[in-house]
Image (spheres, rainbow, N blue to C red):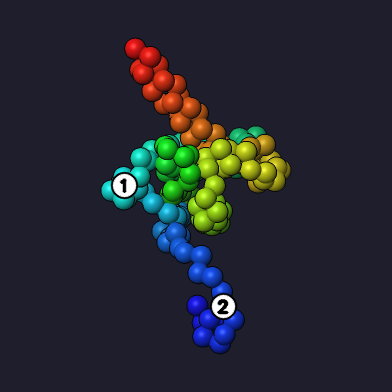
Amino acid sequence: MGRNLFGKRVKYMGTQATSALTLYDKTLAATGLTLVRAKTSGFNAAAVTMTVNYRPTFMPSTVPITMSLVYDKANRQILGAQLYSQYDIAQSANLISVMIQNRNTIDDLAYVDMLFNPHYDYPWNYLNLLGQEAVEQADSQTQEDDHESLE
C-alpha cells in the first residue's frame, strides 16, 4: 500500500481476488475460492448452487441469478462464491468478499439484514436465500453423519 511508504501504517487485509466480467448481456462475478480450489488447498469444503429470480415475478420484469457458495464444513466459514446473471450482480461479489475477510459463516449470510423492496428483491435477498440453502445443506449433512455414527 502506497500510504505505508510515508509512515502512516495501514494493515494489509488480504485479498479474495474478487472480480467481475460483463460478456454480452451477462455478468459473471466471483470472489474467494472455488470448490475445487478449496479442496486442493486442504479445506473440508462443500458448495451449494441455486438459481432464483432476483426479484418477485409479479414485478414487470425479473431475471434469474445462478449462484454457488463455497464453505468450510468444519466451521461453516464462507470461502468463496460465484454468481452469473443478466442482472448486474457484481456488487454481490463485494459483499461476499467482505464476509470472507471478516470470517463470516453461512449462518451469518443466511440472516444478515438487507433491505427489502419488491423493486429490488424478495423479503429475503437472493444472497440470504443462498446462505439459507447452504445452512440447510450443512445441517442435513451433519444429521446424516450423526445418524451414521450411531449405527
Say whether residue 89 is visible.
no
Q: Residue at x 50, y 69 (%)?
A: 12
**Left or right position of 48 against 5:** left
**Left or right position of 94 against 119:** left
At label 2, which amino acid type do we have? Arg
Residue closer to the observer: 138 or 114:
138
Instruction: State which quadrant residue 21 falls in.
Output: bottom left
- First reached walking from the N terminus: tag 2 or tag 1: 2
Residue closer to the observer: 133 or 45:
45
Q: Residue at x 37, y 41 (%)?
A: 45
Q: Are marks 2 and 1 in contact (CB under 8 Å)?
A: no
**Left or right position of 122 against 77:** right
Disc assigned to residue 81: none
At label 1, which amino acid type do we have? Gly
In the rendered image, the residue lying farthest to the top is 151
Q: Which residue is mark 2?
A: 9
Q: Residue at x 38, y 23 (%)?
A: 145
Residue closer to the observer: 147 or 121:
147
Instruction: State which quadrant residue 23 falls in.
Output: bottom left
Mark 2 element type: loop
Say whether residue 149 is visible.
yes
Q: Residues within 10 Å of mark 1 (few under 14, many from 20)?
A: few
Give the image location of residue 98, x and y in percent.
55, 56
Give the image location of residue 134, x and y in percent.
48, 35
Mark 1 element type: loop
User: Marks 2/1: CA distance?
Assistant: 32 Å
Q: Which residue is mark 1?
A: 42
Give the image location of residue 123, x and y in percent.
67, 36
Give the image location of residue 41, x and y in percent.
31, 50
Q: Residue at x 31, y 47 (%)?
A: 42
In the rendered image, the residue lying farthest to the left is 40
Q: Quadrant where the C terminus lies?
A: top left
